[in-house]
Image (spheres, rainbow, N blue to C red):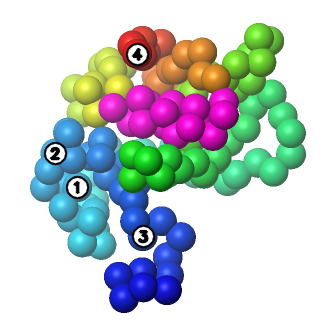
Amino acid sequence: MTEHDTGEPYADSLPFSLVAHWSFCPRRAWLEAMDEKAPKVAQIQQGVADHARVDVPTTREAQTMRGIDVRDPSLGVHGRVDRVERLPSGRLRVVEHKATPVKRAARISDANRLQLVLQTMALESQGNTVEDAEVYFTTHHRRVPVELSP
């Protein structure tokens, strides 16, 4: 262990969610990084409740896997993918669960896209092929495809 090694498994990388939060609101990312509580607004509380189902990892081989921890050391990022679906082609689909944003529209934000790109890159660095990605808006019960360009 080096003097800078904290002993934590991902001490040398950033969580996907922190990178996405920073792209949306640097103040919220700073509060999260400092272990401060984010304001208890209804949207955040809804998001926490909506993630409860997908935050429990599955451990068996399945067509749909939830709560998958992934990491890309070359990028210095890590995090949990809400859901990964194995398609008939054998390739993967990444599905990120989100509560409907403040504007109440099921629209993909730059932060959503950034998080999906990082998750995809981490999965691919582990030898997987990701075919596509979606955001599932839990309050609308609606999937929105997200184009990920190379």
| CA distance for labels 1 and 3 | 17 Å
Q: Are marks 1 and 2 in contact (CB under 8 Å)?
A: yes
Dot placed on the residue nearer the N-terminal end, 4 or 3: 3
- Name the mark nearer the viewer: 4 or 1: 4
Apparent side of residue 58 relative to residue 121 in the rendered image (left or right): right
Q: Give the residue number, with chain letter if any, for mark 2.
A: 25
Q: Are marks 1 and 3 in contact (CB under 8 Å)?
A: no
Residue carrying label 1: 29
> Real-space Cα distance between discs 1 and 2?
7 Å
Q: Give amino acid for label 3.
A: Ala
Instruction: Tell me the element at label 1.
Output: helix
Circle 2 sits in a helix, a strand or a loop, which is it?
A: loop
- The answer to whether mark 4 and mark 1 are in CB contact below 8 A is no
- For the point 21% across and 47% down, the residue is 22
Q: Quadrant of the C terminus?
A: top left
C-alpha separation, residue under disc 4 versus residue under disc 2: 25 Å
Find residue 14 and report its horizontal and vertical position in percent.
36, 56
From where the camera sits, is residue 138 visible? Answer: no
The residue indicated by pointer 4 is: 150
Image location (x, y in percent) of residue 127: 66, 34
Q: Which residues are magenta?
A: 114-128
- Within 10 Å of disc 4 (Cα), the crowding (few <14, some 14-19, many 20+) is few
Is 52 displayed left or right of 90 in the figure? Answer: left
Residue 17 drawn in magenta: no
Q: Are marks 4 and 3 in contact (CB under 8 Å)?
A: no
